Structure formats: structure tokens, C-alpha cells
Image: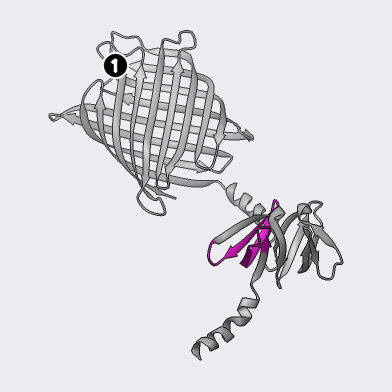
Amino acid sequence: MKSLFTIFLYLPLLGLADTVEVTDGSVLQGKILGMTDGNLTIQTSFAGKIKIHHTQIVTIKSEREISLRLDDNRTFDGSIEKVEDSLLTIKGTGQAFAFAEIKHLWDADSSDPLILAAQKNALAMQMKWKHAVGFDLTGASGNTDSFGLGIRLDSKFGNRMREYDFYLSYLNSTKKDVTIVDETKFGIDYDSRFFEELSWYAKTDLENDRLEEVDLRATAALGLKYSWIEAKYYKTSIRGGAAFRFEELGSDSVKNLSEPALDFGLEHSQALKKFLFLESDLSFIPNIDDFSDFLLRKDTALVLPLDKKEDWKIRSGLAGTYNSTPVPGKEEMDLKYYLRIVYDFN
């Protein structure tokens, strides 16, 4: 008796479900969410959202009011009378519309897809701040073998078209109570996309490194960046431009450096797994007159989010600089590995 009462209670609701029959004979029941670019989306209870291309649809049944927009932007409202031979007829209009000419179809009680797209675009164009603070456990090979602690602060202000990126990092390492690493870095990057995959960039990096006897190492660059690959799970960009190198050294045996240069770079990010990401940034900065005199910088890391919101992350990687003309007595390669705990916030 109870089961019969339950069936009687829910029978009207079952009758309100939308139905889509496809060419292989399958019948899907649920709620039609809309149609865009020739693909109909239906929300089902057993498989979530399912997209069906219009060429696979045999018939549609729905008692709800819908709105549809054709390719020529004419809009019609009403309920579906019938669907035959890839033609959809709206009650009261006396017209049948081919699926191929339907630009949008949506529930009449829902928002127009064009309005939603405009709102989404406006939201994406808003300039927003994003911040991150990271604490490092580091090691080094090259000029010294050591372990140390560091901190890095990152702030980004931008939208999908342009972005400012500021960073400040400090690393200190000791060995037998003697300070062997005392390194401070500060940088500003600016990207502005002006045409599809193309953007122009400007960047500057400042560095002080007592171990390498560098009082100030500064590089500035201006050029073009090309978004070579932009897929769902990975992105790759290449850049190139003019640069300027300046080095004020703490050694009297080496002259200070001040010369024009070039800047070439590769940026890559990739989702290896659902919760594992690869991020890499490589820069090659040669003397404009002598390519054997150059700086090579790299930072490659694996990033592991620690929570669903991805506010907390562990970043483990290798970062360093290869200087083809170091201060006498110092090695060309200064490579550091680090384990960084990062917290992102707005």
C-alpha cells in the first residue's frame, strides 16, 4: 500500500521528464538543459550531463516552454509540438526548424545563453588580485652543498587578457654556523594579449647574491610572446625580445657588466594527473654581440595541491642560473633544489 502511494505521489513528476530518443534506439529521460553548436545537453539521474549531436536525435518530447534562436538571430518561444526528420516544430508558430539552423535552445525560464556568455566574459575581464606565500626547504649544488630556508611572495593582478606579476624571494643557508647563501630576488612581469595567440611582454629581474659576489644583477626585457599550445591539460608559450644586462660585482678583479642582450624563453604548464601538475620556465639571455656570454635560468617543479580548493600546495623543483662568465673562483652553475609549501589567497 505504501509503495502504491509513493508511485501515485511521484507519477505526475515522472510525466514532466523530458525524453530524447537517439538513432540507436536508446531513450534518455531527464531535463533538457539546452542546445549550443548543434549539441543538445540533457541532465540525467544515472549519468549526469550527456551531450548529443543533433544528427543522432530521432525525437524530443518535453512539456516545458522553450526558447530557440536561429543562425539569423530570429528567436521563437513555445513548447515542442513534434520532432520529425531533424525538424523541430514549435506549437502555435506553424513553422518547423532544422536542427542544423538552431544556434541556441534553452529553457524559457532560464537566462539567454548570449546574456550568460556576456556576463561570463565581463567577469573574466575584471582585473583581480591573487597572492601566494611560500616557505622553502632548499639545497644547493655547485658553488656549495648546503641546506637552507627561504620565503617567496607572489602577487598577480590581471584578467585573461593582461597581467602584472610581482615576486620577492629571500634565501638564507648556513653551514657549520657560517652563512654561505644570502640571496634576494625581486621581479616584475607584464603580459598583454593583443591578438589571439600573440601578446607583448615586459619584465625585469633584480638579484643580490653574496655567495656569487654579485651586489646587483639586473636584467630587463621587452618583446613578443606566442601561445604556441593552449589545450585543456597543458599550455606552452615561447617568447623573444630585446634585453639589457647589468651586473655590479663585489670583486675588484672583474669589471662590472652593462650591455645589450637578447631574451628567449619557454613557459610550460601541464596537468600530469588530476592532482599533479608540472610547471617550467626557461630563460636564455645572451650578449647581443657574443652568444658565448650568456645567462641561462630555469625553474622546473612538480605541484601537488593539498586540498580541493587548491589553496595549499606543495611545490618541489629545481631552480638555478648558469652564468657563462662567473666571478673568478666561482662555478658557472648555481643550482638549487627546493621543497616549498605554498598558500594561495585573494
Q: What secondary structure is marked by label 1?
A: loop
* Side (left or right) of 280 relative to 86: left
* Side (left or right) of 215 relative to 123: left
Using the image as rendered, state which of residue 264 and residue 113 is in the foreground.
Answer: 113
Where residue 316 appears, as percent x and y from the top left, is 32, 37
Where residue 250 appears, as percent x and y from the top left, is 29, 16
Q: Main secondary structure of the magenta part?
A: strand
Identify the amino acid type marked 1.
Gly
| Residue position for label 1 | 250
Farthest-out residue, left:
176
Res 317 quadrant in image: top left
On screen, residue 263 above or below 54: above
Give the magenta part as a residue range.
Answer: 21-47
On screen, residue 158 above or below 139: below
Farthest-out residue, right:
94
Res 32 quadrant in image: bottom right
Number of marks drawn: 1
Residue located at (36% from left, 30% from top): 185
The magenta stretch spans residue 39: yes
